[in-house]
Amino acid sequence: MVDTIKREIKFITYIKERQYMSKPWTLDEEFPTEEKVIYRQFTGLKDKNGKEIYEGDLLKLDEKENWVYPIVEVIFDSAEFTTKITSLNKLGEVEVIGNIYENPGLI
């Protein structure tokens, strides 16, 4: 039997031309279909403040852990949400401090 993680499937979108980030939406709702839209999927996880974590978010890692990279980007790779250094589930306490679209200078 395969273990499955039940999480809400929802997205936020970044509309490049207007530099606008949408509110979260599900597939049951009407969603933006403009040409230059970036769809960012919810990971099913929240940061230490209860903020939802989405693909493209920038996470500040727990300083007590002595990470080489104190800020990492959430990516979707090989059918899982991860970072370039480790899986999201192995990061411990994190805080969303921005995203790569609205805050590219953070990384």
Image (cartoon, rainbow, N blue to C red):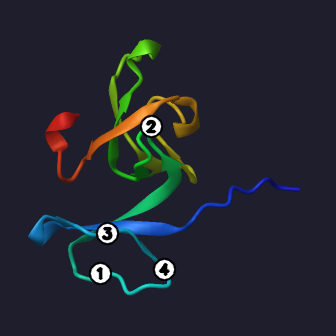
Tell me how far mark 2 sits from mark 4, CA to CA.
Answer: 27 Å
In this rendering, would 64 be left or right of 39? right
For label 3, the residue is 23
- The percent coordinates of residue 67 (x first, y second) are 41, 17
Q: Residue at x 44, y 46 (%)?
A: 50
Q: Quadrant of residue 94?
A: top left
Who is closer to the viewer here, 76 or 32? 32
SS for dot 1: loop
Residue carrying label 1: 32
Assess whether mark 3 and mark 4 are in contact (beta carbons under 8 angstroms).
no
Real-space Cα distance between discs 1 and 2? 29 Å
Specify which label sits upstream in the sequence, 4 or 1: 4
| Upstream in sequence: badge 2 or badge 3 | 3
Q: Compared with residue 95, is residue 100 higher up or lower down, i.e. above or below?
A: below
Callout 2 secondary element: loop
Foreground mark, 2 or 4, reads 2
Badge nearest the viewer, 4 or 3: 3
- The residue beneath circle 4 is 27
Residue to which mark 2 is pinned: 48
Q: Do labels 2 and 4 touch, CB within 8 Å?
A: no
- Look at 82% across and 55% down and name the residue there: 2
Position of residue 95 measured from the top left corner of the image (x, y, whole percent): 37, 36
Q: Residues within 10 Å of mark 3 (few under 14, many from 20)?
A: few
Label 4: few (<14), some or many (≥20) within 10 Å? few
Separation of residues labelled 3 and 1 (CA atoms):
11 Å
Report how far apart the C-alphas of labels 4 and 3 lie in the structure: 13 Å
Q: Label 4 is placed on what type of residue?
A: Leu
| Badge 3 amino acid | Lys
